[in-house]
Image (tube, helix red, strand yellow):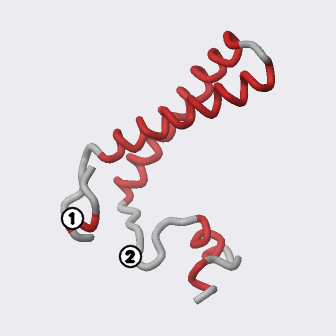
Amino acid sequence: MKSIFQHGCCAPRDTQAPLAKTLSFAVLHFSIAFTVAYLLTGSVLTGGLIALIEPACNTVAFYFHERLWLRRGAKADRERGHGHGNLSGLLGGQGREHQR
């Protein structure tokens, strides 16, 4: 993946970025789901089934969610980004922009 530092903030978007991000998220999610399900059930089979079914559904939903956001043109503000602190700031909480 190309870094924003290599090509600047106004470089053309990498059209493969949503897919790469989705796949890395899937690996992380599968790992966490299996670990939690295994620890709760003690069964490798049950843990494996839960780890495959639940994150697979979320991964597909996440991919289309990312594509929709890109299509809408949601761009990160260079100063604020898309972090959770910014969302709480928009909703009246104490985001990063209020702590400066």
- Which residue is painted at 64% across and 25% down in the image? 34
Location of residue 85 (image quadrant): bottom right
Q: CA distance from mark 2 to mark 1?
A: 15 Å
Picture quarter containing residue 75?
bottom left
Q: Which residue is mark 2?
A: 78
Between label 2 and label 1, give the one nearer the viewer. Answer: 1
Q: Is residue 76 left or right of residue 15?
A: right
- Element at label 1: helix
Using the image, determine if residue 25 lies above or below residue 93.
above
Q: Nearer the viewer, residue 72 or 92?
A: 92
Amino acid found under the numbered disc labelled 1: Gln
Q: Residue at x 43, y 48 (%)?
A: 66
Which residue is labeled 1 in the image?
Answer: 6
Spot occupied by residue 38 in the image (x, y as percentages of width and height): 72, 22
Q: Position of residue 78 (x, y in %)?
A: 38, 76
The spot of residue 7 in percent (x, y) is 19, 65
**Amino acid type, residue under disc 2 in the picture:** Arg
Q: Residues within 10 Å of mark 2 (few under 14, many from 20)?
A: few
Is the C terminus in the top left, top right, bottom left or bottom right quadrant?
Answer: bottom right
Residue 41 disc label: none
Residue toward you, 54 or 43: 43
Tell which of 45 and 72 is nearer to you.
45
> Seen in the image, is 76 located left or right of residue 12?
right
**Is residue 75 found left or right of 34 in the rendered image?**
left
Residue placed at 42% from the left, 54% from the top?
A: 69
Label 1, residues with CA under 10 Å away: few <14, some 14-19, many ≥20: few
